[in-house]
């Protein structure tokens, strides 16, 4: 089967950070990764001392069992340690805890506290260039503070922090029966530098099902590398996050569980052991469930095939579904009044100005059924495949008012066309019937830009106040949209100096951002994973908008002169100046 593609500009760069002991690679800088704060953002805390992580945590040349990570060690408590030494020693041991299951870190706690402490309940990440600060209060308790770049919860969901967010952890200590200091109160979870988060956790996509059971809807999760396969199965069985659940179907039985043997990999085949109650019974549901498991597990190097057992019952072969990152095809645009596909000399004409009935058509889109959609003045035109004349399916405002308040249309795979009509998010079918879109958050702000994900089941929206959010699209069994699920805010795609919105991969969006002085003021392209890393690329001077194929990070920039630029390797090159209003169709 086709292995899901990884985010080459984001995930691969993140993994290089995790394995690097020196400076971060130029592809994903410390400032850009996961929305890192600058060193100055943390401020200077009076009366605090920096946690000395440069000494005390060491790496051996031996790889940890089942992973490629080197074993890290940290010393345990000493009899002469002060209370502050115990806090600092615990923080160091927690960073190295993935090599010994946090056994050394627990030595700094009382037995009762160690039994209750859950190190992976919450993982708070900070920029490794800004060390945490440890301060002592008048009552003898200690406070650990640091700039925070994000929080990873026990389900593997990473939430990037708003810029300027700080971590604060309170620690209380007492002496034991031998007079040695031990920690009796502390926050659940651990505090890690970003590089250690990348080193010890793998970023993977869970493959959930669309409501019509025809496509995968992916969600990014972070799982410990030592248990990545088992964690992926547990994540699938638990279901998607609340913001995504309304846009997915779940055929996995509610009482499904991973059996004690879990996932066993031999010769490229992963055998997944589930409880007998995990059998969905019907043949179709079995095949779809196996397809979800296979699509999720083959992201792991060394896994090529999957076999799923519910008790002793083999659930059989997977259903054949479009992969999470499908092939999209060529660009659609305008050339001399005609709608074309492709940008080279061999581009294909999809609709001439004569067939469209207008010479001022703009913003073309190609529907899943081959229908061509264009804007003309204040109207949306539709040309069915094989027909010789287009018809108006939507009009707003005064026809003499030029654009008439219509934004570029986008045809989804269900036969609906999405566009902004006088600032309102609108979806119409081929007959021009509007869908009534209900949302608890959408009416609160005017929409200035949007895009649909590659499988047509999620939407990214930029509001007039600069905030960006993603949400699931709620549809009925026929694919008719009826509303949007809860909003998942994307702070790193939002704010002043950012504009536009486009999906650039199944789990990432991209925006244009004002360039800083370091780049000579050239606009930047910011790629933001939904629940993951951030990468910033230098764009093109005069960039007006950025769009992508939504699947494989094929990025193009349109500049103020109307030229279309494509990124090839590390360089931007002019792709065409003859084809205007370019877009990628949804597969």
Image (tube, helix red, strand yellow):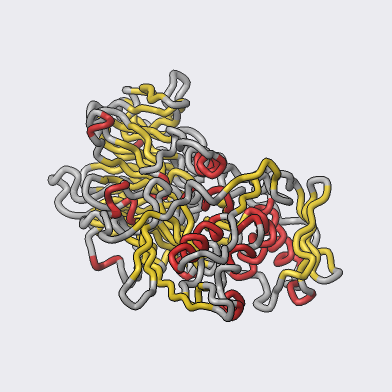
Q: Is residue 107 above or below residue 176?
A: above
Front position in the image: 283 or 270: 270
Front position in the image: 466 or 146: 146
Residue 442 point in image, percent of width and height: 30, 65
Front position in the image: 539 or 138: 138
Q: Residue furthest top?
A: 345
At horizontal 24% and vertical 67% (from top left) the residue drawn is 444
Left or right of residue 46, residue 50 in this image: right
Residue 221 point in image, percent of width and height: 54, 58
At horizontal 64% and vertical 60% (from top left) the residue drawn is 232
At horizontal 27% and vertical 59% (from top left) the residue drawn is 45
Q: Is residue 107 above or below residue 355?
A: below
Residue 33 point in image, percent of width and height: 42, 45
Q: Residue furthest right?
A: 312
Quadrant occupied by the N terminus: top right
Residue 9 point in image, percent of width and height: 48, 38
Q: Quadrant of residue 488?
A: bottom left
At horizontal 41% and vertical 24% (from top left) the residue drawn is 571
Whether residue 429 is visible, yes or no, is: no
């Amino acid at each position: 089967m086709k292995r899901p593609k990884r985010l080459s500009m984001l995930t691969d760069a993140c993994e290089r950070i995790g394995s690097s002991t020196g400076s971060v690679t130029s592809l994903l800088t410390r400032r850009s990764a996961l929305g890192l704060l600058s060193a100055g953002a943390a401020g200077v805390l009076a009366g605090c001392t920096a946690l000395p992580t440069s000494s005390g945590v060491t790496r051996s040349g031996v790889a940890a069992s089942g992973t490629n990570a080197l074993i890290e060690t940290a010393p345990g408590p000493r009899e002469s340690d002060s209370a502050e030494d115990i806090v600092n020693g615990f923080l160091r041991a927690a960073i190295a805890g993935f090599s010994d299951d946090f056994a050394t870190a627990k030595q700094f706690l009382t037995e009762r506290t160690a039994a209750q402490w859950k190190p992976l309940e919450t993982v708070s990440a900070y920029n490794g260039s800004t060390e945490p600060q440890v301060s002592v209060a008048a009552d003898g308790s200690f406070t650990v503070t640091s700039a925070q770049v994000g929080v990873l919860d026990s389900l593997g969901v990473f939430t990037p922090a708003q810029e300027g967010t700080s971590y604060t952890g309170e620690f209380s200590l007492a002496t034991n029966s031998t007079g040695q200091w031990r920690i009796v109160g502390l926050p659940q979870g651990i505090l890690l530098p970003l590089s250690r988060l990348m080193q010890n956790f793998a970023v993977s996509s869970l493959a959930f099902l669309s409501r019509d059971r025809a496509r995968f809807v992916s969600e990014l999760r972070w799982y410990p590398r030592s248990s990545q396969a088992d964690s992926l199965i547990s994540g699938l069985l638990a279901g998607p996050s609340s913001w995504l659940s309304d846009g997915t179907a779940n055929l996995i039985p509610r009482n499904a569980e991973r059996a004690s043997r879990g996932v066993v990999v031999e010769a490229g085949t992963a055998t997944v052991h589930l409880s007998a109650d995990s059998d969905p019974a019907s043949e179709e549901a079995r095949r779809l469930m196996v397809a979800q498991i296979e699509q999720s597990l083959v992201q792991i190097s060394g896994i090529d095939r999957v076999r799923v057992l519910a008790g002793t019952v083999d659930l059989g072969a997977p259903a054949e579904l479009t992969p999470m990152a499908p092939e999209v095809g060529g660009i659609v645009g305008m050339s001399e009044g005609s709608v074309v596909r492709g940008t080279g000399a061999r581009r294909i004409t999809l609709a001439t100005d004569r067939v469209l009935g207008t010479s001022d058509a703009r913003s073309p889109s190609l529907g899943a059924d081959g229908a061509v959609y264009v804007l003309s003045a204040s109207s949306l035109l539709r040309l069915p495949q094989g027909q010789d004349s287009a018809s108006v399916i939507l009009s707003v405002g005064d026809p003499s008012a030029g654009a008439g308040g219509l934004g570029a249309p986008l045809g989804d795979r269900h036969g609906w066309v999405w566009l902004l009509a006088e600032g309102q998010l609108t979806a119409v079918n081929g007959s021009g019937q509007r869908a009534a879109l209900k949302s608890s958050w959408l009416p609160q702000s005017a929409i200035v830009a949007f895009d649909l994900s590659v499988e047509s089941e999620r939407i990214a929206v930029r509001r007039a106040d600069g905030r960006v959010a993603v949400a699931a699209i709620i549809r009925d069994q026929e694919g008719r949209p009826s509303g949007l699920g809860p909003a998942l805010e994307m702070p790193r795609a939002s704010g002043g100096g950012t504009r536009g919105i486009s999906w650039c991969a199944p789990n990432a969006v991209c925006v244009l951002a004002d360039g800083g002085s370091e780049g000579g003021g050239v606009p930047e392209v910011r790629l933001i994973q939904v629940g993951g890393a951030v990468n910033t690329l230098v764009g093109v001077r005069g960039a007006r908008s950025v769009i992508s194929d939504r699947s494989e990070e094929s990025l193009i920039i349109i500049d103020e002169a109307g030229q279309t630029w494509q990124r090839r390797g590390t360089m931007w090159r002019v792709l065409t100046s003859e084809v205007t209003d370019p877009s990628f169709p949804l597969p």
